[in-house]
Image (cartoon, coloured by chain):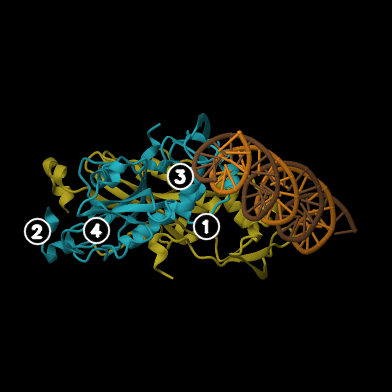
Chain colours: A cyan, B yellow, C brown, D orange
Amino acid sequence: MYTTSANVAERQTAPPSLAISTVIFALRPSEASGRPTLWLPLVRRIREPFKGLWALPGGPLTHSESLPDAASRNLRETTGLAPSYLEQLYAFGGLHRSPTQRVVSIVYWALVQPTEAALADESENVRWFRADKLGDLAFDHNAIVDYALWRLRNKLAYGSIAYHFLGEYFTLAQVREVYEAVLDTHLDPANFRRHIKATPEIEETGEYLQGGKHRPPRLYRFTGRPGLDPDNRSTP
Amino acid sequence: MYTTSANVAERQTAPPSLAISTVIFALRPSEASGRPTLWLPLVRRIREPFKGLWALPGGPLTHSESLPDAASRNLRETTGLAPSYLEQLYAFGGLHRSPTQRVVSIVYWALVQPTEAALADESENVRWFRADKLGDLAFDHNAIVDYALWRLRNKLAYGSIAYHFLGEYFTLAQVREVYEAVLDTHLDPANFRRHIKATPEIEETGEYLQGGKHRPPRLYRFTGRPGLDPDNRSTP
DNA sequence: TCAGTTTTAGTCATTGTGACTATAACTAGC
DNA sequence: GCTAGTTATAGTCACAATGACTAAAACTGA
């Protein structure tokens, strides 16, 4: 790698290096209330700069990899999961993001469905954190997470993205809990139901979720497709 | 530059190179109807690949330049203008965008106010084109322009961006013409007026535009700030 | 002075939405 | 087996936003 062996003079003239990072969101029941809350996995830095601090999963872009493939690989390597939603967030290229060299990071954000296996996929250097209790991260990663949260909330409020947090079948209350967790608000169940039922991408199934200590709710299914990013446009 | 002197084997292992491109929009009266239409400047390629074809203005990222600075420089070098609005569009990184090497392009899009000077800033290798009549461009630049158009229309419909096409003072009819040109629709003047007057960022001035052959319209002023991209967030 | 033009104000019906009430359908505990 | 507790689901009401439309106001040019 030319960046590790370069001296200061060489780094001045070398082109900015290119990295891919990924902000990975999942919902997980809070220990306290049991309601779902937003979590994301971070990786501990094992070398300078910012050695010991937590950072977003990422790494250099391989020559034969597309950008979303690199982001998916990040995701799989840190969580063992495949994304149910993946979208480019932003390219961060400020001059002093890293103290040692000029790095341009193309950041993706993803939603995953947390299985028991995935959240157990932790180690000394990979840990899940509540999105609202992160502490100080390496580089400009706090700002990146803030922006990813802003985008997630925007997409949730205007787009049809909540379903990617959930499995194939879900109740309307589960969808509402996603909204309440991510947007940190309380929503009226009756109005929320009316709103969701007006969107054509939600299909009623004949099944009901049994086992609760109350009237069994109907199960629904999401039939829509993800948005139309340049990455997803060609695939029909 | 290591990319021009590299042979095939070296290109396989070298990191993907990084470029900045810019989609620059301006409104200009159509010759036929006199109504404003959307135009953008392109640059003729003077070397392979795609030699002779038209392409988006762009170039490599200088070591000491931030991403929006590089985009602004593109813009100034091809149009002689400063952007009234500049926003990151997307990072395009497909494996085969360029037939000769792997290039990742971080693309910005901009709005400029066309002065007479600017549109005269054409040459053999720089020309303005109507956005709906571009022909075949180099690389994946047709897809990039399509996506930029989609973003522009979205921002126009939901955000407060139309005013960056106009000068400091404008009539509501001029704003409406921006919407009609970009979205390619007809809008009822009375309803449009009501809609605009409901947004608090538009300030009524005491001035009127004289000289038309009809009732002189009041002049307005835009008092809002651009959005909150990561690039613009720190600047208060 | 009048015809032609655009600006500006206002009405009316429809739709979307927040607040709220009421009933339905289940479980748990007695 | 009955009842209280809980959530699901349906519906009402007032209000805001919006599309279609009518009409008056204020200028120019003939």
Residue B63: image x %, image y %? Answer: 24, 62
Q: Chain of mark 4?
A: A
Task: Say which residue appears at 34% left-offset and 41% top-offset.
Answer: B140
Which numbered disc covers residue A162? 3
Chain containing mark 1: B
| Residue A41 can be seen in this image | yes
Q: Residue at x 60, y 44 (%)?
A: B185
Q: Residue at x 14, y 40 (%)?
A: B8
Q: Nearer the viewer, mark 3 or mark 2?
A: 3
Q: Closer to the camera: disc 2 or disc 1?
A: 2
Find numbered disc 4 in the image and state the secondary structure of the residue it sits on.
Answer: strand
How much space separates mark 1 and mark 3, taking CA atoms? 28 Å
Element carrying mark 3:
helix
**Residues at badges 4 and 3 in contact (C-beta under 8 Å)?**
no
Q: Quadrant of the C terminus of chain A?
A: top left
Q: Secondary structure at mark 2?
A: helix
